[in-house]
Image: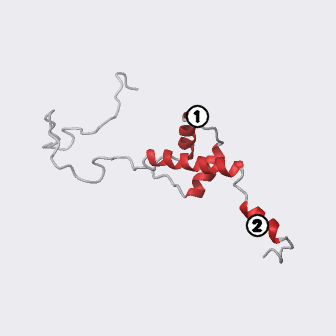
C-alpha cells in the first residue's frame, strides 16, 4: 500500500504507531461521559439534556459536538409515552352519581339537558 501511495514504509509505520491526538483523546473521554449520562437517564435524555448534564459535571463541550458524538455512539433517546387513563378503555367500576342527576323526561322539552344557551334578562 505504501508503494502505491508513494510513501516510504518507515514513514507509514511511524504514522501508524503515533499516539492519538489530543482531540481524539478528548473525544474518547467525552464519549465515556456521554454514555454514562445517557445510561443514568434511563436512555431518555437527548443531546440538549446530555449537554446540560456534562456542564453540571464541569465538562466543557459544544452542543453540536455532544450531538455528533451521540450519533456516533448510536444513542437515540426513547421518550416515554404519557400515561393516559380512561381515554379508550371502559372503567372497571361505574362512576357513582353523587348528585342524583336524572336526565329522563316524560315529554319533549320538559328537561333541557346540556342546553348552554345564554338567556339575558332583557330580551330584544
- The front one of 26 and 120 is 26
Q: Residues within 10 Å of mark 2 (few under 14, many from 20)?
A: few
Q: Residues within 10 Å of mark 1 (few under 14, many from 20)?
A: few
User: Whole-percent x and y of residue 46?
Assistant: 53, 47
User: Whole-percent x and y of residue 62?
Assistant: 66, 42
Residue 58: which disc?
Answer: 1
- The front one of 51 and 19 is 19
User: Whole-percent x and y of residue 122?
Assistant: 37, 22
Instruction: Single out the residue that lies furthest toward the top.
Output: 121
9 vs 51: above or below: below
- The answer to which of marks 2 and 1 sits earlier in the sequence is 2
User: Whole-percent x and y of residue 77?
Assistant: 49, 52
Query: Which residue shows up at 29% across the image and 46% down it?
Result: 85
Residue 100 appears left or right of 18: left
Residue at mark 2: 13
Query: Which residue shows up at 20% across the image and 49% down it?
Result: 91
Instruction: Single out the residue that lies furthest toward the front.
Output: 10
Query: Which residue shows up at 58% across the image and 50% down it?
Result: 31
Amino acid at each position: 500500500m505504501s508503494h502505491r501511495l508513494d510513501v516510504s514504509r518507515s514513514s507509514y509505520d511511524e504514522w501508524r504507531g503515533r499516539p492519538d491526538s489530543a482531540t481524539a483523546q478528548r473525544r474518547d473521554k467525552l464519549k465515556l461521559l456521554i454514555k454514562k449520562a445517557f445510561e443514568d437517564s434511563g436512555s431518555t435524555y437527548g443531546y440538549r439534556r446530555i449537554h446540560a448534564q456534562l456542564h453540571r459535571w464541569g465538562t466543557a463541550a459544544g452542543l453540536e459536538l455532544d450531538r455528533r458524538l451521540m450519533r456516533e455512539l448510536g444513542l437515540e433517546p426513547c421518550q416515554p409515552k404519557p400515561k393516559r387513563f380512561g381515554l379508550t378503555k371502559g372503567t372497571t367500576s361505574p362512576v357513582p352519581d353523587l348528585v342524583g342527576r336524572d336526565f329522563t323526561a316524560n315529554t319533549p322539552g320538559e328537561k333541557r339537558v346540556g342546553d348552554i344557551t345564554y338567556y339575558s334578562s332583557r330580551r330584544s
